[in-house]
C-alpha cells in the first residue's frame, strides 16, 4: 500500500518526467540548439584561417577542441545545466567526443601527427557501427554488474558524443559503417541540422525508454513549484 510520502514521490516523479519531455522542446533548449548550429558554422569558418590551416598541430588541436565543445554542448541540451554535477557530466561528454581522435595515434602506433593523419584506413573508433555496439554493451554490462542507476546516462552520453563527432568528420570523409562500407560525404547543412537536432531526438528516446525517469530518481527530484 502506498504511503502518502510514496504517492507524493510518485506524483513528483511523473511531474518531473512530464517536465523532462516538455524540456526537450523548451524555449531554452531550442535556443541552445540553434546556438549549437551557429557555433558549428562559425567554428568551421575560424578553422579556415590561414594561421590555423598552415600549422598541422594547431589545426588538429582546434578541430579536436570543436569536437569537444559540440559534444559537451549537445549533452547540456539534453540535461540542462541546473546543478554542479550537470557541469561534470557535460565536461565528460566533451572529453568523450574529443578522445576518440586518439585512435588515429593508436592505429599509427606513433605520436607523429603526419603518421596519424595518413593512415591506410580510418581507425576503429571512427566506425559508426561501433557506437550502438558500445552503447548496448555498456547497458548490458551495467545490468550484469548491477551498477547503480546513476550511471544509466552513460550509453546515451557515448552515443551523443560519438555521433556528433562522426557526423562532423563525415562532411569530409562520409560515414563509415564497417563492415558495410562508406557513405558519400555528409552535406554541410545536413551535418549542422543533425548536430543541432540529435540531442532532442535522444532526449525523446531517453524519455520513451525510461532513462529520464531513472536519471531523475537517482539524481534526486527537483520540484520547484
Ligand atoms: Zn575524428
Image (cartoon, rainbow, N blue to C red):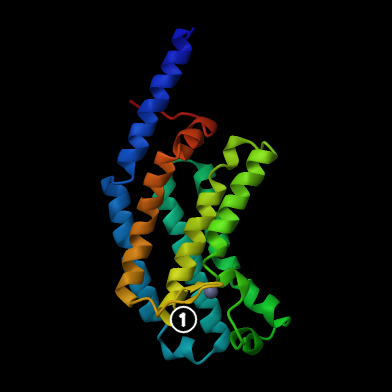
Nearer to me, 91 or 209: 209
User: Could you tell me which residue is drawn at 33 percent across and 73 percent down?
Assistant: 41
Q: Position of residue 27 (x, y in %)?
A: 26, 47
The answer to which quarter of the image holds residue 174 is: bottom left
The answer to whether residue 16 is above or below residue 70 is above
Nearer to me, 222 or 109: 109
Q: Residue furthest right?
A: 109
The answer to which quarter of the image holds residue 191 is: bottom left
Q: Is there any visible trace of residue 183 in the rendered image?
A: yes
Q: Position of residue 99 (x, y in %)?
A: 60, 66
Looking at the image, residue 44 sits to the left or right of residue 211; the answer is left
Q: Which residue is mark 1?
A: 173
On the rendered image, what quadrant is the C terminus found in?
top left
Q: Is there any visible trace of residue 88 in the rendered image?
A: no
User: Could you tell me which residue is drawn at 58 percent across and 79 percent down?
Assistant: 122
User: Could you tell me which residue is drawn at 50 percent across and 50 percent down?
Assistant: 156
Asked if disc 1 is less than 8 Å from ligand 1, the answer is: no
Q: Position of residue 200 (x, y in %)?
A: 35, 51
Looking at the image, residue 28 sits to the left or right of residue 91; the answer is left
Classed neighbour count for the residue bearing mark 1: other residues with Cα under 10 Å, few (<14), some (14–19), many (≥20): some
User: Could you tell me which residue is drawn at 52 percent across and 67 percent down?
Assistant: 128
Q: Position of residue 49 (x, y in %)?
A: 41, 87
Nearer to me, 208 or 87: 208
Looking at the image, residue 80 sits to the left or right of residue 151; the answer is left
SS category of the residue bearing label 1: helix
Q: Residue furthest front?
A: 180
The answer to whether residue 182 is above or below residue 115 is above
The answer to which quarter of the image holds residue 147 is: top right
Number of numbered discs visible in the structure rendering:
1
Q: Residue furthest left?
A: 27
Nearer to me, 31 or 155: 155
Amino acid at each position: 500500500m502506498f504511503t502518502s510520502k510514496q504517492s507524493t514521490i510518485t506524483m513528483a516523479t511523473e511531474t518531473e518526467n512530464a517536465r523532462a519531455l516538455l524540456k526537450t522542446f523548451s524555449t531554452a533548449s531550442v535556443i541552445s540548439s540553434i546556438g549549437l548550429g551557429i557555433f558549428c558554422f562559425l567554428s568551421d569558418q575560424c578553422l579556415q584561417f590561414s594561421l590555423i590551416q598552415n600549422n598541422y598541430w594547431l589545426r588538429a588541436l582546434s578541430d579536436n577542441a570543436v569536437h569537444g565543445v559540440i559534444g559537451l554542448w549537445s549533452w547540456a541540451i539534453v540535461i540542462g545545466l541546473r546543478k554542479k554535477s550537470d557541469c561534470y557530466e557535460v565536461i565528460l561528454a566533451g572529453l568523450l567526443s574529443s578522445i576518440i581522435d586518439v585512435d588515429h595515434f593508436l592505429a599509427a602506433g606513433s605520436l607523429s601527427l603526419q603518421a596519424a593523419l595518413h593512415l591506410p584506413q580510418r581507425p576503429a573508433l571512427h566506425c559508426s557501427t561501433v557506437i550502438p555496439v558500445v552503447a548496448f554493451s555498456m547497458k548490458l554490462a551495467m545490468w550484469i554488474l548491477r551498477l547503480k542507476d546513476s550511471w544509466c546516462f552513460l550509453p546515451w552520453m557515448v552515443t551523443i558524443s560519438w555521433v556528433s563527432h562522426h557526423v562532423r568528420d563525415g562532411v569530409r570523409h562520409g560515414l563509415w559503417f564497417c563492415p558495410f562500407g562508406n557513405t558519400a560525404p555528409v552535406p554541410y547543412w545536413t551535418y549542422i541540422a543533425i548536430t543541432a537536432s540529435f540531442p532532442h531526438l535522444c532526449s525523446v528516446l531517453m524519455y520513451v525508454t525510461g532513462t529520464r525517469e531513472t536519471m531523475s530518481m537517482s539524481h534526486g527530484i527537483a520540484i520547484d513549484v
